[in-house]
Image: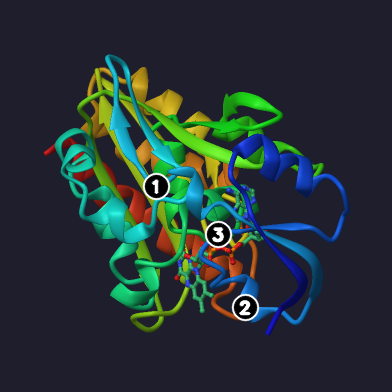
Amino acid sequence: MFSFSKFFLASSIEEAYSELVKNKKNIILGGTSYLRMGNTAWNVAIDLSNLNLNYILEDEETISIGAMTTFRNLETNSLLKEYFGDIFLTALKDIIGVQFRSNVTVGATVFSKYGFSDLIPVLLSLNAKIKLFNGGVLSLEDFLNEKEIRKDILVEIIIPKKISKTSFQCVRKSKTDYSVVNLAISYSENKITIAVGSRPGKAMLAQKTMDILNNSENIEKDIINAIKYIGDEIPLDSNMRGSKTYRELLLTALLKKGIQEVLN
Ligand SMILES: Cc1cc2nc3c(=O)[nH]c(=O)nc-3n(C[C@H](O)[C@H](O)[C@H](O)COP(=O)(O)OP(=O)(O)OC[C@H]3O[C@@H](n4cnc5c(N)ncnc54)[C@H](O)[C@@H]3O)c2cc1C
């Protein structure tokens, strides 16, 4: 179990950030489910619960999701369902149980860039941006590609508000285990976006595969062609959940299934 010397209930995001950067052992608390798995002794634990960061809001062009929004909020939200179908529900419903998902937060998950995450590929496939308190707005893809670990606070996720057909595919060895590999696809305005996660590395976009499909005159015919590319462009590896070869076989099968799902 993790521990900390001092608890700090922030009354503004500015205050939370200034406390965070005072000491490298100061941390932000999300739902603390992941922090509780470690044994680290932290200095100041900064709580964002009073900052009204649990929201899913829309404006003309975007949907914003606050950092303290829980997975359960995502999977039951009617606005997300209206624009993106069941992708949040499908991706999140098998993560442990309802109580757990009512606690874990979007901000902690995305900021931590977990390779096993089922949420991050979904957000990547929807071309999400993130807003950091100090770092400002940047694309989720650029953030995931950064090597440095920032000392910052993720404030919100911003998704373009486009009605999309979507699909989430994954294979788990048992119901509540991490995905062996996962795949999120969105299709809107004749453009397919494909994100692969649990490779087991961080999620990434399948750029060449997307180009083949998006430049195709007949996507259904070119699926076979695209499937050949995804294995070449997405680096896969082995870990305790599956070998590289197993992941390669799964990924091609899941891609075919996912594309057919968004086209129909
Ligand atoms: C047993 C277990 C099983 C899991 N299984 C799955 C699974 O199958 N699929 C899946 O996708 N995920 C899974 N997860 C991960 C889970 O869904 C969350 O992503 C994870 O728990 C982090 O969320 P949290 O709110 O608990 O974060 P915390 O534990 O509170 O924080 C995690 C890290 O994020 C930092 N942090 C928190 N909030 C912010 C912020 N706003 N800005 C910057 N940094 C911040 C914290 O300082 C900490 O370093 C699992 C987690 C556990 C513990």
Q: Which mark is residue 25?
A: none
Sooner in the amino-acid sequence: mark 1 or mark 3: 3
The residue identified by callout 3 is: 30
Dot 3 or dot 2, earlier in sequence: 3
Tell me the CA gap for discs 3 and 2: 11 Å
Q: Is residue 214 left or right of residue 165?
A: right
Q: Which residue is tagged 2?
A: 36
Which of discs 2 and 1 lies nearer the camera? The answer is 1
Numbered mark located on residue 54 in the image: 1
Q: How is the image coloured?
A: rainbow
Tell me if residue 235 can be seen. Answer: no
Disc 2 to disc 1, C-alpha distance: 21 Å
SS for callout 3: loop
Q: Name the quadrant containing residue 82.
A: top left
Q: How many marks?
A: 3
Q: Is mark 2 within 8 Å of ligand 1?
A: yes
Residue type highlighted by circle 1: Asn
- Please report contact status of discs 2 and 1: CB closer than 8 Å, yes or no: no
Q: Position of residue 167 (x, y in %)?
A: 26, 47
Ligand 1 lies under 8 Å from the Cβ of mark 3: yes
Q: Residue 72, can we see it? A: yes
Q: Residue at x 59, y 39 (%)?
A: 12
Label 1 and label 3: CA atoms lie apart by 11 Å
Mark 2 surroundings within 10 Å by alpha-carbon count, few (fewer than 14), some (14 through 19), many (20 or more): few
Give whichever of 210, 30 is nearer the camera: 30
